[in-house]
Image: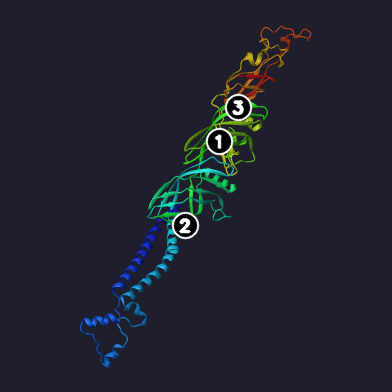
């Protein structure tokens, strides 16, 4: 587009027009001079002599007559070829006219078709094209709508109008294609530029993609924040001062990169479970930041795959190590845990928040991720997408998605007493457990755990198994004393032939010691036991 600067060509065109005007004027001048300086014939000379008393011609002496027969010479006319400049005014004028006509017929085509295009190409090379902002919208399988704010620095002195033209888009240079490879085409609408300075145009067109793989590679670089050059070639028609000029252009520009950062998932809310697909459906908000003037809109619902590394999200890792081990690129230890559907996907400069649905698959990695989230651990999930838009866009994004842990503590408190841990109780009657009947079906012993639901929907927990740790390490020792529950010393144990509880628990004391540790113990829920919130 920068060749719009070729409005300078109009200056040479004006010079040519002036030359043609000069030729026309000289022609009229010669004609006028021809009429005023005509040479009289013999009869006219005879009449003139008669009027002035010279009716009869006198014969000149022989020497004079012989002298009159010699060729007439004027200073400077030393050769025969100079007679066109030394003759009559009429001959000289026609000679000058012929020479000017020859020069016009010979030099004007050279100036018009050789010198002027060379000057225009030189001006075109000095023209710069800068894309200030752009919007990509409504992608299909083979094309996408693009509108932009473009600054063109016209190096020419005159303004010009550019006809609509068909431009070929080339990818950045690479080893197999030093000049890039054609990846698509577009029709650039007509526009007008002012001379000698920058001008702003707002073209809107449809980009047709012919090489999806090359376009996809280029788009990946743009989403990674790289400055990706676009090269455009075409044949255009430039109008300046009412005169059209055909010019070849080959210009390179850079589209603003689209670097999306600070991806985060928040406001997770368990929606429902799909027993057909064996998936857990969660509503969530996905937010990210864009510093680019490039906008994306009209993309509809975008689908992305989610991958999780169990080892790369170990709670003991630092955030930097977690991003390095659990983030992109996808490695062998990454497991697909589901996909994310982002509705009405659009990107604007600044902070963006999009409503999403997350479909989690039922597998080991998903369970580890949910447990760590409920345990308030931050995690890193890798998203890859989109997967449903078009061949030249799908898969251009592979990035880390930071998922902060739940803001609600799952287990808020636990306590242990002699009544709950040692004595126990019958869950059906509430009475203390019998010594001879302490099975799991009739006696519950253990700690009491209290918690809160991190989700906004009722859910159920069963088959609980967790380890309890102290905040500090302790080293301790003690003695186990066998002591009968007060009031049961004389109770007879059934089927023992009169043995009492006191007799049964007459066991010597046992001492023990434990090394320094922060492990308190492991807790199991009874088989079939569940808790509802």
Q: Nearer the viewer, residue 33 or 496?
A: 33
In the rendered image, which residue does mark 1 sit on? 300
- Dot 3, crowdedness within 10 Å: few (<14), some or many (≥20)? few
Give me the disc on residue 472: none
For the residues labelled 2 and 3, the Cα–Cα distance comes to: 85 Å
Q: Is residue 172 above or below residue 267?
A: below
Q: Quadrant of residue 458?
A: top right
The residue mark sitting in front, 3 or 1, is 1
Which callout, 2 or 1, points at the residue further toward the start of the chain? Answer: 2
Taking the view exactly as shown, the residue that stands out farthest to the bottom is: 62
Q: Which residue is mark 3?
A: 516
Mark closest to the chain's N terminus, 3 or 1: 1
Q: Position of residue 354 (x, y in %)?
A: 53, 32
Q: Residue at x 35, y 72 (%)?
A: 96
Relative height, residue 170 to residue 277 (above, below): below
Residue 247, disc: 2
The residue that appears at 63% across and 28% down in the rendered structure is 280
Name the residue at the left extreme. 53
Circle 2: element type: strand
Q: Is residue 479 left or right of residue 114?
A: right
Q: Is residue 224 something one can see in this rendering? A: no
């Amino acid at each position: 587009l920068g060749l719009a600067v070729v409005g300078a060509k109009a200056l040479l065109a004006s010079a040519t027009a002036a030359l043609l005007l000069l030729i026309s004027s000289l022609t009229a001048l010669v004609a006028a001079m021809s009429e005023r300086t005509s040479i009289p014939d013999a009869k006219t000379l005879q009449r003139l002599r008669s009027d002035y008393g010279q009716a009869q011609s006198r014969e000149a002496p022989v020497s004079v007559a012989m002298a009159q027969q010699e060729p007439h010479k004027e200073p400077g006319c030393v050769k025969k070829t100079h007679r066109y400049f030394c003759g009559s005014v009429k001959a000289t004028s026609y000679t000058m006219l012929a020479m000017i006509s020859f020069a016009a017929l010979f030099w004007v085509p050279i100036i018009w078709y050789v010198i002027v295009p060379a000057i225009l190409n030189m001006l075109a090379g000095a023209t710069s094209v800068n894309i200030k902002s752009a919007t990509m919208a409504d992608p299909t399988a083979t094309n996408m709508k693009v509108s932009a704010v473009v600054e063109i620095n016209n190096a020419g002195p005159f303004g010009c109008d550019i006809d609509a033209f068909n431009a070929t888009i080339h990818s950045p240079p690479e080893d197999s294609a030093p000049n890039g490879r054609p990846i698509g085409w577009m029709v650039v609408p007509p526009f007008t530029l002012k001379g000698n300075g920058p001008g702003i145009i707002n073209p809107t067109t449809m980009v047709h993609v012919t090489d999806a793989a090359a376009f996809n590679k280029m788009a990946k670089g743009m989403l990674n924040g790289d400055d990706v050059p676009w090269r455009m070639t075409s044949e255009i028609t430039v109008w300046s001062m009412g005169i059209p000029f055909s010019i070849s252009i080959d210009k390179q520009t850079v589209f603003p990169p689209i670097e999306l950062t600070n991806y985060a998932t928040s406001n997770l809310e368990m929606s429902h479970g799909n027993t057909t697909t064996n998936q857990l459906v969660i509503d969530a908000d996905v937010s990210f930041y864009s510093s680019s003037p490039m906008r994306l809109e009209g993309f509809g619902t975008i689908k992305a795959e989610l991958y999780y590394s169990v080892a790369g999200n170990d709670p003991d890792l630092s955030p930097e190590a977690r991003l390095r081990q659990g983030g992109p690129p996808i490695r062998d230890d990454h497991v697909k845990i589901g996909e994310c559907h982002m509705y009405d996907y659009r990107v604007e400069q600044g902070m963006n928040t999009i409503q999403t649905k997350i479909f989690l698959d039922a597998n080991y990695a998903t369970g580890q991720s949910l447990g760590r989230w409920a345990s308030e651990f931050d995690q890193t999930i890798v998203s890859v997408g989109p997967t449903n838009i078009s061949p030249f866009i799908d898969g251009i994004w592979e990035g880390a998605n930071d998922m902060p842990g739940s803001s609600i503590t799952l287990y808020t408190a636990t306590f242990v007493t002699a009544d709950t841990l040692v004595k126990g109780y019958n869950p059906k009657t509430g009475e203390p457990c019998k010594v001879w009947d302490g099975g799991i079906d009739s006696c519950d012993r253990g700690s009491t755990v209290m918690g809160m639901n991190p989700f906004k929907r009722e859910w159920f927990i069963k088959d609980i198994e967790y380890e309890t740790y102290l905040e500090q390490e302790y080293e301790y020792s003690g003695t186990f004393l066998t002591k009968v529950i007060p009031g049961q010393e004389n109770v007879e144990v059934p089927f023992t032939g009169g043995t009492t509880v006191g007799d049964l628990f007459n066991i010597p004391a046992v001492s023990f010691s434990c090394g320094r540790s922060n492990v308190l113990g492991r807790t199991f829920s009874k088989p079939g036991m569940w808790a509802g919130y």
